[in-house]
Image (cartoon, rainbow, N blue to C red):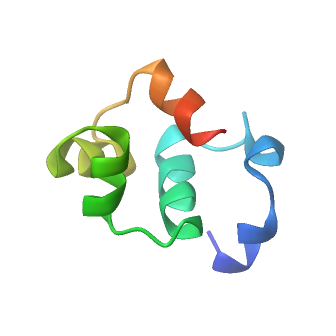
Amino acid sequence: MRLAGLEMTMEHLRGKMKISELLKLWRIKHGMTQEQAAHELGVVVKTFHNWETGKTTPPDYIRKAIEK
């Protein structure tokens, strides 16, 4: 995924990207490290890393939180 695509809104991307891709886009768009993003979402860094790499899937409330 190219960073030039960051101007696309999260709403436009909804349903077209995997949750792991959405998490990474959200994190980069907000200028956060994985550590900062994990803190923002109230999870440990390893959990966020697993979500962002697609190793595990976050609960539905995480998708709702990043789509705001």
Q: Residue at x 40, y 21 (%)?
A: 59
Relative height, residue 53 to residue 6 (above, below) = above
Work out whether residue 33 can be spotted: yes
The quarter of the image holding the N terminus is bottom right
Residue 11, by quadrant, is top right
Q: Residue at x 37, y 50 (%)?
A: 52
Q: Residue furthest top?
A: 60
Residue 56, by quadrant, is top left
* Image side of residue 22 versus residue 39, left or right: right
Total of numbered circles in the picture?
0
Relative height, residue 62 to residue 27 (above, below) = above
Q: Position of residue 30 (x, y in %)?
A: 54, 65
Q: Residue at x 26, y 52 (%)?
A: 49
Q: Position of residue 12 (x, y in %)?
A: 83, 46
In the depicted view, which residue is nearer to us: 5 or 30? 30
The quarter of the image holding the C terminus is top right
Work out whether residue 53 can be spotted: no
Q: Position of residue 57 (x, y in %)?
A: 37, 30
Q: Residue at x 57, y 60 (%)?
A: 25
Q: Position of residue 60 (x, y in %)?
A: 49, 20
* Image side of residue 51 versus residue 1, left or right: left
